Image (cartoon, rainbow, N blue to C red):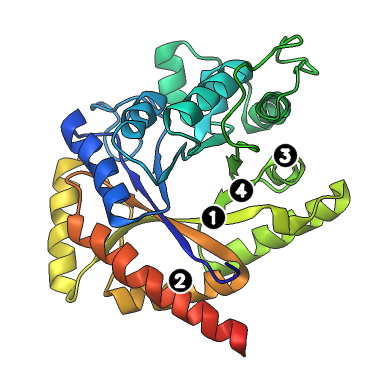
Amino acid sequence: MANEIKVGVLPWGQYTDWPSLLRAGQRADELGYDSLWTWDHLYPIQGDWRGPIFEGYMTLAGWAGVTSKVTLGLMVGANTFRNPALTAKMATTLDHMSNGRAILGIGGAWFETEHEAYGLDFGSGFGERLDWLDEAVEVMRAMADGEEATARGPRYATKHVRNDPPPIQRRLPILIGGDGEKKTLHTVAKYADAWNTGGDLEFVRHKDEVLRRWCGEVGRDESEIERTLGLGLVVIRDSADEARAMDAVIRKQHPGFDDPPKIGTSEEIAASLAPYVELGFRHILFDAPAPFDDETLERFVGEVKPMLEAGSTAAARR
């Protein structure tokens, strides 16, 4: 559908227990969300890093067994954590476990503390890690498409690697997260099926323009790349006092978390998102920290999504 809006949710794997995290994913599927995501981190990234967190791909595998419709992916995978051929194999296995609902989310990685603790190579800086990402995604794309992949080097030594069985999906989607104009968006233009970003409207508009320029340079149809927008924490209530009370409960469970939430009624949230939809970002997701806020879960998909769809349809008729 030309005016279809998709919505997703990212339950945090930090400062929670497995039954609660499992249920959050199951609840998203029951409510009719289009996509379900989690982080790929080994230490918490919001607030105090010295706390509990679950591993990303294992979380997705757990959710695959208790969901039936929602797509599953990391937002986004840390390329530095795994050999790219192994990543492609894991995403393919998840595609089979979920009967064709996997998305291979990937990015350059940024959290040095967890790399040092786990003995993972962090490289010399963002530039080098983004070079690694570009080389890695080339391997992943080939393997997901059923080709024998050989890495071009110098970072990876993959040679004629097979991916058997292939994914269930004819084209297993690769989503790349990041905003770097010289390297990341170039990689998106070459290989990605979807791109994730976030921020204020002018920031997102500018990054989208850069991506379009890169698509022109590499000969890619920019409309083939799905635009996805990450919102961070959202709390939907009919009064600001109710929203702030829920926000306080969340922050108590995540000591040191200080990012400002997006608070409002369903109408206010939808109105704030309408300009992004008009820009072409038709897949919108938000963060859900524990204790998982069922009212916001219900109202984002049950109220905000229909409002955005109605607005999109009206705009298309003008």
The residue at which mark 3 appears reads as 191
* SS assignment at label 3: helix
Decide: is 81 above or below 56: above
The residue at which mark 2 appears reads as 273
Please, what is the three-letter code of the amino acid marked with disc 4? Ala
Decide: is 240 above or below 235: below
* SS assignment at label 4: strand
Residue 164 disc label: none
Residue 228 disc label: 1
Horizontally, residue 236 falls left or right of residue 268, namely left
Horizontally, residue 304 falls left or right of residue 91, namely left
Could you tell me if the residues under marks 3 and 2 are in contact, i.e. CB atoms within 8 Å?
A: no
Please, what is the three-letter code of the amino acid marked with disc 2? Leu
First-in-chain label (2 vs 4): 4
User: Cα distance, mark 2 to mark 4?
Assistant: 19 Å
Please, what is the three-letter code of the amino acid marked with disc 1? Thr
Q: Residues within 10 Å of mark 4 (few under 14, many from 20)?
A: many
- Considering the image in quadrants, where does the C terminus appear? bottom right
Could you tell me if the residues under marks 3 and 4 are in contact, i.e. CB atoms within 8 Å?
A: no
Residue 194 disc label: 4
